[in-house]
Image: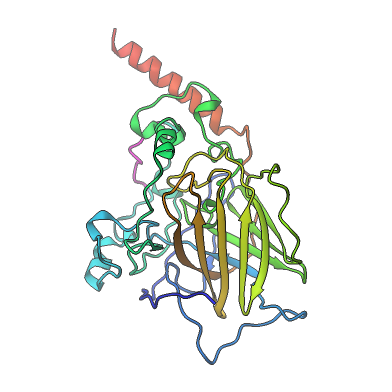
């Protein structure tokens, strides 16, 4: 079973889901951003073949950051006053300009979940921060570019300036299972021999065998890795290896890894409306130590629809055109 600390949470939930290209609106049935513990008197529902039933549509939307902010160093739980000051809902405006160059979003497009009283999703290391990246990884990240590079004033000259998330290929793991800007929704299906997790963002489908088969050979590498699941009591444990090294961004809402990446996830249904989700990431090529994050997945009313993002859509040519337009404006202004 998962060993999870008792965390405080705020009972209010206000979620706005606005999705570029395809828009969905879901209403969570329980507050997001907070893990709970199973009541001694509560048992999870079972499938007809006797496994704990995780099926349904779930969200992990939250504005609780992955890492603890530096100004909250040493502080695991916010006070009521601190929570009120940091709650992003108070200052949110649908009309606010992003203030960023070509290709970015304003607040209208961002899915705003609840800020819990926890100061980070990361629980290990105990400081709530990602471990230090290896020297080789730091050098790699200094060369990686993406659409976010525009925030620093970079111009786009080729499709190679964009990462695989920009190109709607994959967010990798554990990125696909952690909150980002929007589309924090998942649909879980079960059979006696498989669990399937349909990820709304970039419509990844994770097909997880439960029959004890071995992982595929090391020569086979996949965007989402090669997952194998098993039940430990009421907890579904999923171990994933065999990742590609082509997802090179490790920041923001994208998180891939190298060939050495191993991801271990634990799904435990703790009440009718909540799955406790825990993920441990180990990649000695990227991180100097393992790290673990914990977040709840809360039940949603409604179905999951296709997120119509695909490689070669209009974002890339429009971002390139925008850079050319900015260059032309700068040239005219310098005459």
Q: Where is residue 302 in the image (x, y as percent from the top left)?
A: 62, 66
At 49% from the left and 44% from the top, the residue drawn is: 285
Q: Nearer the viewer, residue 284 or 103?
A: 284
Q: Is residue 1 above or below residue 60?
A: below
As drawn, which residue projects farthest toward the top? 335
As drawn, which residue projects farthest toward the bottom? 41
Q: In this view, does 309 lie to the left or right of 102?
A: right
At 61% from the left and 42% from the top, the residue drawn is: 244
Viewer can see residue 204? yes
Q: Looking at the image, how many numbered discs can be counted on the residues?
A: 0
Q: Nearer the viewer, residue 330 or 34?
A: 34
Q: In this view, does 280 lie to the left or right of 93?
A: right
Q: In this view, does 211 lie to the left or right of 66?
A: right
Q: Where is residue 16 in the image (x, y as percent from the top left)?
A: 46, 59
Quadrant of the drawing holding the C terminus:
top left
Q: Is residue 67 above or below residue 133?
A: below
Q: Is residue 325 left or right of residue 267?
A: left
At 51% from the left and 62% from the top, the residue drawn is: 279
Residue 100 painted magenta = yes
Viewer can see residue 306? no
Magenta part mainly helix, strand or loop?
loop
Q: Is residue 273 above or below residue 66?
A: below
Residue 273 painted magenta = no
Quadrant of the drawing holding the N terminus:
bottom right
Give the quarter of the image for residue 82.
bottom left
At 50% from the left and 50% from the top, the residue drawn is: 283
How was this image coloured? rainbow
Q: Position of residue 241 (x, y in %)?
A: 62, 52
Magenta segment: 95-101
């Amino acid at each position: 079973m998962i060993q999870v600390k008792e965390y405080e949470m705020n009972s209010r939930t206000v979620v706005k889901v606005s999705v570029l290209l395809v828009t969905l609106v879901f209403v969570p049935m329980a507050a997001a951003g907070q893990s709970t513990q199973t009541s001694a008197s509560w048992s999870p529902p079972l499938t007809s073949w006797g496994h704990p039933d995780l099926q349904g549509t779930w969200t992990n939307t939250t504005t609780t950051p992955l890492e603890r902010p530096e100004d909250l160093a040493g502080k695991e739980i916010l006070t009521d006053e601190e929570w009120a000051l940091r709650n992003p809902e108070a200052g949110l405006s649908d009309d606010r300009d992003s203030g960023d160059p070509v290709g970015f979003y304003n607040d209208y497009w961002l899915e705003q979940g609840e800020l819990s009283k926890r100061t980070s999703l990361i629980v290990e290391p105990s400081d709530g921060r990602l471990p230090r990246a290896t020297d080789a990884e730091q050098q790699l990240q200094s060369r990686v570019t993406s659409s976010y590079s525009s925030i620093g004033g970079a111009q786009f000259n080729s499709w190679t300036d964009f990462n695989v998330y920009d190109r709607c290929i994959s967010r990798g793991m554990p990125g696909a299972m952690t909150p980002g800007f929007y589309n924090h929704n998942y649909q879980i299906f079960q059979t006696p021999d498989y669990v399937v997790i349909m990820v709304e963002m970039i419509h990844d489908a994770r097909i997880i065998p439960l029959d004890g088969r071995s992982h595929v050979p090391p020569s086979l590498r996949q965007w989402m890795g090669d997952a194998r699941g098993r039940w430990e009591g009421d907890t579904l444990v999923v171990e994933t290896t065999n990742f590609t090294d082509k997802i090179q961004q490790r920041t923001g809402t994208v998180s891939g890894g190298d060939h050495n990446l191993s991801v271990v996830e634990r799904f435990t249904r703790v009440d009718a409306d909540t799955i406790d989700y825990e993920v441990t990431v180990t990649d000695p090529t990227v991180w100097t130590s393992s790290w673990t994050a914990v977040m709840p997945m809360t039940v949603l009313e409604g179905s999951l629809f296709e997120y119509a993002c695909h490689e070669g859509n209009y974002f890339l040519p429009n971002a390139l055109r925008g850079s050319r337009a900015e260059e032309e404006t700068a040239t005219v202004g310098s005459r």
